[in-house]
Image (cartoon, helix red, strand yellow):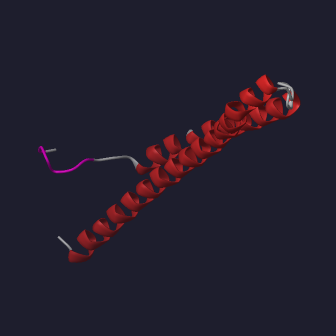
Amino acid sequence: MPEGSGFTMDPDAVKTGAGRFGPVVDGLNAAKRELESALQAAGECWGGDESGKEFAKDYVPGAQQAVEAFGTLAQGVAGLRKNVESGAEGHDARNAEAMKNISSKGP
């Protein structure tokens, strides 16, 4: 293929590859659930004294941000999978349309 003329891809292979994102999303969601469970099980283990309250000021928001980050990352990977699949399907549809146009013009 001449330089700068585009690229080729196998839409089925791309869709198959995009399917590998599913277990990653599942793993991130599982890690999020485990983290939430561990944080809930630990409770407010730092105590209610002055040093415990100081600790909690940073710990509680940081723990919540960590849980949210797993959720956000899982959503991002799921979105990436969807975009890759859509791109492959769109590429496949454009190729089918191009072939249809070529065959309708005849030899």
Q: From this viewpoint, is residue 86 visible?
A: yes
Q: Position of residue 95 (x, y in %)?
A: 33, 61
Q: Range of the magenta residues?
A: 2-7
User: Vertically, is 19 above or below 99?
Assistant: above
Q: Residue at x 38, y 47 (%)?
A: 10
9 left or right of 74? left
Seen at 46% across and 58% down, the residue is 86
Answer with the quarter of the image where residue 57 lies: top right
Left or right of 43 in this view: 11: left
The residue at the far front in this view is: 50
From this view, report whether residue 90 is shown above or below residue 46.
Answer: below
User: In front: 67, or 17?
Assistant: 67
Residue 102 on the magenta span? no
Please tell me which residue is depicted at 17% across the width and 70% down the height of the picture: 107
Q: State the predominant SS element of the stretch in magenta.
A: loop
Q: Quadrant of the N terminus?
A: top left
Q: Quadrant of residue 46?
A: top right
Q: Nearer the viewer, residue 36 or 4?
A: 36
Residue 102 position in % (x across, y down): 24, 69
